[in-house]
Image (tube, rainbow, N blue to C red):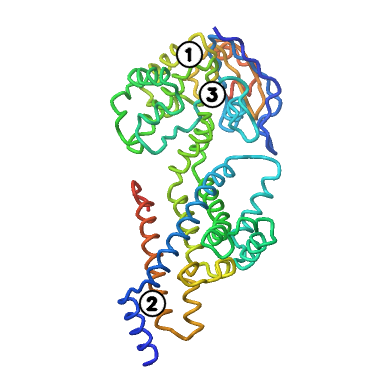
Amino acid sequence: MSFLWDSLREAFVYLAELGPDLRGIFVLTLVVSTTATILAAGIGIPLGVWLAQARFRGRWLILTIVNVGMGLPPVLVGLFVLLLLWGDGPLGALDLLFTPSAMVIVQTILALPIAIGVTLGAVSGLAPAATEQLRALRLPFTGRLRILTSEARVGVLAAVAAAFGRVIAEVGAVLIVGGNIAGETRVLTTAIVQETRQARFGAAIALGIVLLVLSAVVNGGLTWLQTQGSEDV
Amino acid sequence: MSDRFTFTALTFPTDGSVIDGVDMSVGADESVALFGPNGGGKSSIMRVIAGTAPRTEPLAEIAYLPQTPYMFRGTVLSNLVLGLDPDESDHARRLARELEVGRILGKPSDAVSVGEAQRICLARTLASRAPLVLLDEPLAPINAASRTEIGAIIRKRTSNRALLWATHSLDAVRVLADRLIVLDGGVVIQVGSAEEVLAAPATERVAEILGAG
């Protein structure tokens, strides 16, 4: 029991010190995760809206790919991106491996199907009268996108929250393409793995607390946005 | 003045088609009512012509009012002018006043009644310059006391244009229809002027449908 208390005490000491390594890890986690979420949402929400509305031959295949993508094993995506970015790989010349950019790429790939799939579900669930009225208006895609994301805002924000949840909790893929290099590519999740392996449980707990708080703050903000102007959520 | 719109072999593009091979036409400055029981195929025909049914495209330049009015998030005004150009938007405001909803334009869109929403959607549809106007049950959500008045406004504001509208109400037919197409089970069972059809139903089934209207 005293082992747990000692670890907790160490964790709070670690947090209270707020050393430059913790700040660096926190900032990099925030930057990489929010960038990947913004990219995934920026691409995935319009695609999800389009897929919800479009009817074309082979649509089921695209939907299947999206659904499979939502459950992609992160280490597999990490390996795939590693091979792409490896020195002799197709994108090796970009020299992105073991950089935050590589971590953003891998996290965007992981979050994109979630942004598409959850948005698609939200827009598909709108009242038939809404979609019929919108089709009747013959608006350009940007106009339809604006209205549909507004109508399905609760679900669309859930897509953003789910995408953020995927990237903020990600460890395997970012470890493979980022390398967990101290001061360069170490983020909260990979740092927790590192500290745990070295039996520095106090530091691991402290990093876990920061991760939880960061996740709670971002999701709290998204929940606040979801509830604006709605009496039913 | 717009041309005559002729539609042939209209089919709802799904399995278990509600309509199959329906032919019809609407002349310029003519009001044609699709009349029939619920499930008779009226809305399906509207959706196929308007291009809102799955895997369809509009068959002409159309202003279309779907059966159920829907107000998107925002203000009543933002809904009124949605998809309209500046000239049409000005026209829509005038029409909203004419339809007695001019004073609610600043309200949030979720604070209006179904009847008010219908009038706003109707004003937006009529404000479009499209030569063919499709209205699906335009008077159904309007209170009974105002239907004649609203019907007259619709007729006036679609003059020189082709008007095709769906209804299952004989009162609405009397107010608004020049010609009547009676539908049953997705099939046309009588066509004629409103007076002719009402005075002399071609079959017992037509008489039965008219009797229920």
Say which element carries label 3.
Answer: strand
Q: CA distance from mark 1 to mark 2?
A: 71 Å
Q: Earlier in the sequence, mark 1 or mark 3?
A: 1
| The N terminus of chain B, quarter of image | top right
The reply to whether dot 1 and dot 3 touch (C-beta < 8 Å) is no
Whether A81 is drawn above or below B70: the answer is below
Front-lying residue, A83 or B152: A83
| Same-chain status of marks 3 and 2 | no
Which class describes the residues within 10 Å of circle 2: few (<14), some (14-19), or many (20+)? many
Q: Is residue B153 above or below residue A129?
A: above
Q: Quadrant of residue B35?
A: top right
Q: Is residue A90 left or right of residue A202?
A: right
Amino acid type of disc 3?
Ala
Label annotation for residue A206: 2
Q: Residue furthest bottom?
A: A2
Three-letter residue code for mark 2: Ala
